[in-house]
Amino acid sequence: MYLVAYDGSALANAALDRAARFASATGHDVLAVAVVPDDSKYAVEAGWVPSREVFDRQTVVGELHKTAVDIAPSASFRAVSVGRNPAPGNIVAELKAVASETDASVIFVGSGNAGRVIVPLVSVGGNVASDDSHDVHIVRHASPEIHRRFPKSHFYLP
């Protein structure tokens, strides 16, 4: 099982695409996991909604699922809920729990920070990469094709 930490960002889209390509060569399954807090402020900061007033967790989950399936039609998708004001550690803990539950062999993470000598404390990717219980594949660059096909503004479309 390949697990992808998925938030709909360009790097997460690239990580999902990479996991799907690896899976087609190795015969592994792919699971995209979106940790979606029930927090309108977080949703705005993640770029999922334009304002706190329009936040609806189910709509965000639906858009993430739709985009994930567009990128990797054979992948499974799971949304995990965490409470308000989640610390990056809470999000990482949820990802690690799903990775352990599914016996993931590799976690794919799209992150500009993971794997560097100095990693910001708020880096989900960096915190996942620092755990040695799973192999981690870090995707630092999204191809222009990913940017063209899956723009971040996809969330704002009706």
Image (spheres, grey):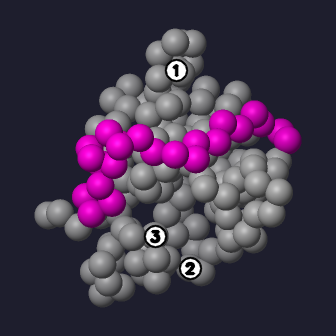
Residue 155 is drawn in which quadrant? bottom left
- In the rendered image, the quadrant that contains the C terminus is bottom left
**Residue 123 sits above or below residue 41 on the image:** above
Alpha carbon of mark 3 to alpha carbon of mark 1: how far? 28 Å
**Residue density around tag 3, few if under 14, some if 14–19, many if 20 or more, within 10 Å:** some
Check disc 3 and give the amino acid type: Ala
Left/right of residue 148 with respect to residue 96 in the rendered view = left
Q: Position of residue 102 (x, y in %)?
A: 65, 33
- Name the residue nearer the viewer: 18 or 27: 18
Comes first in the chain, label 2 or label 1: 1
Label ID, residue 46: 3
Amino acid type at image mark 1: Ala
Residue at the image position 71 percent from the left and 38 percent from the top:
136
In front of the other: label 3 or label 2?
3
- What mark, if any, has residue 78 been given in the picture? none
Residue 53 found in image quarter: bottom left
Q: Earlier in the sequence, mark 3 or mark 1?
A: 1
Q: Position of residue 58 (x, y in %)?
A: 34, 63
Q: Quadrant of the N terminus?
A: top right
The residue lying at 83 percent from left, 57 percent from top is: 117
The secondary element bearing badge 3 is classed as loop
Depth check: 9 or 96 in front?
A: 9
| Residue 94 in sight here | no
Tally the marks: 3
**Above or below, comparing residue 39 to residue 63 in the picture:** below
Judging by the rendered image, the residue that carries numbered circle 1 is 23
